[in-house]
Image (cartoon, helix red, strand yellow):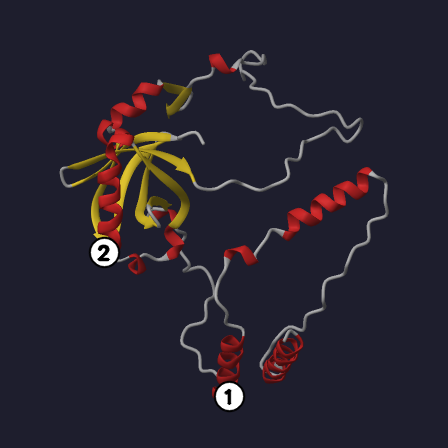
Amino acid sequence: MRPIWTGGITFGLVYIPIKLYSATNAVEIDLDLLSKKDKSPIRYARIDTKTGKEVAWKDVVKGYEHKKGDYVVLEPEDFDKVDMEKSQNLEISSFVDEDEIDPIYFETPYYLEPDPKAKKLYALLNKALKKSKKVGIAEFVMRNRERLCVIAPRGNMLVINQMRYEDEIRETSDLEIPGKTDVDSKELDMATDLIEKMTEKFDIADYQDDYIKKLKKLIDAKAKHKTIRVQKPEKRVEANESNLTKLLQESLIKFKVEAHASR
C-alpha cells in the first residue's frame, strides 16, 4: 500500500512519526461512457473558455475568483503556508469516550503505521487508549482541507476515522418528523418481541454486495447474447394503523417458521 499522508501524531509533548493509509477499497464496476451511435468511448477535455482549445494537465492551476472574472492563483506551497503545523502533524487536542460521538459524524477510516523508530511510542499510545477506554480527537490538513478525526485502537493498530464537522450535517427542521407519539402497548410489545427474535451477533462477513455480483452476471449474459430473466421483487404490504397488528403477528409467525426450518 502507498501512504496518502505522512506526518506525526502529537499529544502533549509526545511526537510519533506515522504514515496514513486508506483503510477502504471501493468495490464497484468501472463503467465507461460511450456514444450511443457507435459505442465509441467518450473522453473528457479541459477546454479554455476563451480560446476554445484543450489545455494540458501541466498547464492547469487552481485559482479562487475573489472578484467577478478576477482570479487569485494558488500554488501547491500556498496551501501549506495556511497552517504549516497542521499540514505536518495530526495533533490530538483531547480524549473522549467514543460513545459520546454521534455516528453520523463518522466518514472515512484510515490505518496508521509508525515509523520503525517509533514503534514503542505507537504501542504505548495504543495500550493507553485501551486502558483508559478513550479515543483521541485530532485535526490535520490533508489534500488542502482541514480534517477532524478520531484516533482509536484496533487490535495492535491505531486507526483514525475522519469525521464531518458540525456545519457539514444538514438541518432537519424542514422534515416532517413525528414528535411525541402515543403507540399501542400491544403493538409495541410485539415489535419488541420481533426485534429480540431477530437479534443475532453481528459479523461483517455475513454481508456482501449482492448488487455488484448480479450486475456482473447480467453483463456476462449480455456479452453472450443470452436471455436475461428478471426476478420480480416480493410484493410488500404498506403498514398503516388498521393492519399493523396483523402484520406484526404474521412477521412473528414467519420468523418462528423460518427459525424452526433452519434447525
Q: Position of residue 105 (x, y in %)?
A: 37, 51
**Toward which corner of the image does residue 84 lie, by quadrant?**
top left
Q: Position of residue 85 (x, y in %)?
A: 22, 30
Extreme bottom residue here? 186
| Residue 131: numbered disc | 2
| Residue 186: numbered disc | 1
Would you say 47 lies left or right of 167 here? Answer: right
Point 67% across, 76% down: residue: 261
In the image, is residue 194 above or below residue 64?
below
In the image, is residue 90 above or below residue 172?
above
Would you say 62 lies left or right of 223 here? Answer: left
In the image, is residue 182 above or below residue 80?
below
Point 45% across, 71% down: residue: 178
Badge 2 or badge 1: first in the primary sequence: 2
Badge nearest the viewer, 2 or 1: 2
**Amino acid carrying mark 2 in the image:** Lys
Q: Position of residue 63 (x, y in %)?
A: 40, 21
Q: Residues within 10 Å of mark 2 (few under 14, many from 20)?
A: few
Q: CA distance from mark 2 to mark 1?
A: 44 Å
In the image, is residue 206 above or below residue 201?
above
Extreme left residue here? 13
Comparing 66 with 252, the one in front is 252
Point 30% across, 57% down: residue: 98
Badge 1 element: helix
**Toward which corner of the image does residue 72 lie, by quadrant?**
top left
Badge 2 element: helix
Would you say 208 lies left or right of 36 here? Answer: left
**Amino acid carrying mark 1 in the image:** Lys
The quarter of the rendered structure image containing the C terminus is bottom right
Q: Position of residue 184 (x, y in %)?
A: 49, 86
Comparing 26 with 65, the one in front is 26
